Amino acid sequence: MTTPRSDPPQSPPAKTVRVVVKGRVQGVFYRNWTIENATQLGLKGWVRNRRDGSVEALFSGKPDSVQEMEQRCRCGPPDALVTALEVFPSGDDPGTGFERKPTV
């Protein structure tokens, strides 16, 4: 008699989103805070300032971790005042780590 073979559980596919954070989010340590939090959650991607005063980021990783990062971005670091968070599904390549990109 043979025992049924059980395959190891499959991890869910990576989720990738692009977010735009609006409010008082520049000059308040938002990008460094984002890098610290995204790294802590094991996410890949990037963050950058935009000339319109917003901050844009790409997060990719386990769906639960991406969702947690979205929630954290709604508050941001202590001196930030987030007034809006826009989240878009993305097919962009997140790269191999988490980095700061130049302002666009």
Image: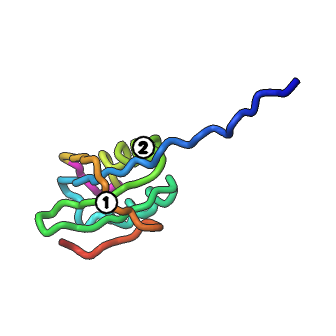
Per the rendering, the mark at residue 92 is: 1
SS at circle 2 = helix
Asked whether 73 falls inside the magenta stretch, the response is no
Name the quadrant of the N terminus. top right
Q: Amino acid at mark 2?
A: Glu
Q: Residue at x 22, y 54 (%)?
A: 20
Q: Earlier in the sequence, mark 1 or mark 2?
A: 2
> Which corner quadrant of the image does residue 104 belong to?
bottom left
Q: Which region of the structure is painted magenta?
A: 77-82
State how far apart marks 1 and 2 are (Cα).
20 Å
Q: Is residue 40 depicted above or below 83 in this figure? A: below
The picture places residue 51, in percent across and down from the top left corner, at 13, 69
Q: Residue furthest front?
A: 1
Is 84 displayed left or right of 99 in the figure? left
Q: Residue at x 41, y 67 (%)?
A: 95
In this view, the residue in front, 24 or 41, is 41
The picture places residue 7, in percent across and down from the top left corner, at 68, 37
Q: Amino acid at mark 1?
A: Asp
Q: Residue at x 82, y 27 (%)?
A: 3
Which residue carries the number 2 mark? 68
